[in-house]
Amino acid sequence: MSQGKIVKVSGPLVVASGMEDADMFDVVRVGDLGLIGEIIEMRGDRASIQVYEDTAGLGTGAPVVSTGAPLSVELGPGLIETMYDGIQRPLEVMRQKAGSNITRGIRVPSLDREKKWDFVPRVKAGERVESGDILGTVQETVIVEQRIMVPCGISGVVESIESGAFTVEDVVCRIRKDDGQTAELTMMQKWPVRKGRPYKEKLVPEMPLITGQRVIDTLFPIAKGGVAAVPGPFGSGKTVVQHQLSKWADADIVVYIGCGERGNEMTDVLMEFPELKDPRTGESLMKRTVLIANTSDMPVAAREASIYTGITIAEYFRDMGYSVALMADSTSRWAEALREMSGRLEEMPGEEGYPAYLASRLAQFYERAGRTVSLGQEGRTGALSAIGAVSPPGGDISEPVSQATLRIVKVFWCLDSSLAYRRHFPAINWLQSYSLYIDRLTRWYEENVSRDFPKMRAEALMLLQEESELEEIVQLVGADALSAEDRIKLEASRSIREDYLHQNAFHDVDTYSSMNKQYKLLRLILDYYELAKDAVSRKASFSRLAALPVRETIGRFKYVEEAQVDEAYAETFAELKKEIAELISEEAEVDD
């Protein structure tokens, strides 16, 4: 271990001399309290250290001791339902130990060392195992089965394996490695956060991550294993969108990283998630969630660590064969932390003061997402989908963080302050957002929703685009100057906006829409458009078509309970055909 002394303190940056034996990204203990830090620059025997705790009171001459190991996370039973800070210290354990305020230098293990877990072996003595093979399982929560895997770099023959209740430090398996040595394995393993966990193969994303949010699932879907960005100005609903995705996304595990956002938003998550029921299992959502909180009032340097801590935990569950959804709220606060540390290191600034390596750091983070085949003989398929919120100052997405993110991600959900001001939520602008996964997902939609669903999506987007163009004419000369066909087009577009894209996150029924319900509702709106167009061509009155009673029924279709969707659709469609047929008949009689 290398030991040096502090020669400079600049906020979260500490410079120590006498560290020639230390390495980049080593974890160090700083000062008499042993504050946790990480070496981020080496110049001769001087190490620049970002400290993950408050450095108030540190002075020159204080000791700095290197641990000789990189910043790592502990992976094993006990992750689910736990809330960690940016460097994987459990907040609840720290509160019990030191009170409501985090005490500097406090040391607590990431995983409970005393709790015993029931370990059920999957292999027998004499069997050969490789890195990534499942040795046994632990039922961590009623939803999540923790799969204890052979750590990377170990393969050989199982000498012995235990069954029963053990702590995460107890030896449960002994493997005679190929070099003749014996490896003693526990249920816990460590992994450096800056290094992506290895896998056998990366697959092409071919299945959507169903979120229950109509504007996302229908117009701008994200694939399982895909990456998405949610940029938007203050008050446009980024956090609520991420909360909705955490609650309802079709993922086995959710890792939510509150990176530099307001503390009351993390409090909302903590208060809401235990109360919310998982739509698939009926259990609390916390039973499949890991929370990482590094709020705006916590040490700025730990924001960077929180992002890497979160994605390493997510990769661990992906390797078990689970579908994992990672929410990062927000990557802008992480980038601001990079900018602050870069400034204190006196590095050459890039655009708007951000470091020149901003884009590569963002790419390194998002590239760790994907759909993969895990190591091991079984070859499990898992997926890690990463969704990052971006908070551009003033809502200007031309700033560096937004632009660097857009060059990496394939789904862009552009939140619009004007939509939010009109109380249209989710405030995702349908003219500026996009998804590059559409072509790959078309086949899945045809096979699992309906053969005409991709065509309906394209038609809905076309109507919204044409509405935007017609609105410019309306503002100049008024709606009365438009033809009846164009006015019907505006009515159908309004129905898509208000009845389909608008969704109430706080309504018991409307908060989540199944793909069947989404298809039926969009089908009704487009059926109205086609039948109304036909009626107009037969000289039916536009004003009467726009005021049909069935319009109200279509508008309220999104509040229909899931079990009644098919029946309600059949009734509404029959009512629609009947009302338009009666209208055409009445108009024909008047003409005669």
Image (cartoon, grey):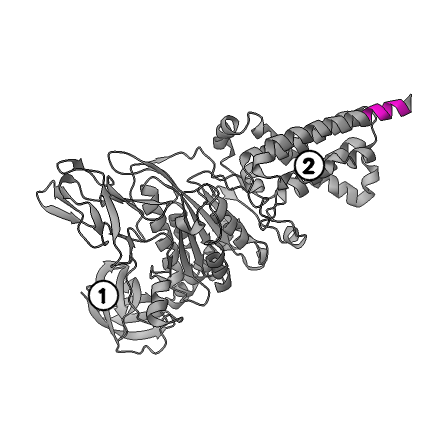
Three-letter amino acid code of the residue under disc 2:
Ile
Q: Is residue 535 left or right of residue 52?
A: right
Q: Residues within 10 Å of mark 1 (few under 14, many from 20)?
A: many
Write down the quadrant of residue 347 in the picture. bottom left
Q: Which residue is mark 2?
A: 554
Q: What residue lies at 59% left-to-right and 28% top-to-bottom?
A: 455
**Residue 563 colored in magenta in the image:** no
Percent across and percent down for residue 209 are 47, 39
Q: Residues within 10 Å of mark 2 (few under 14, many from 20)?
A: many
Q: Is residue 67 left or right of residue 344?
A: left
Q: Nearer the viewer, residue 528 or 366?
A: 528
Magenta-tinted stretch = 584-590
Q: Nearer the viewer, residue 510 or 419?
A: 510
The reply to whether dot 1 and dot 2 touch (C-beta < 8 Å) is: no
**Residue 585 colored in magenta in the image:** yes
Q: What residue lies at 59% left-to-right and 54% top-to-bottom?
A: 236
Q: Is residue 1 above or below residue 237?
A: below
Q: Which residue is mark 1?
A: 66
Task: Specify whether residue 246 is in view.
Answer: yes
Task: Specify whether residue 350 is in view.
Answer: no
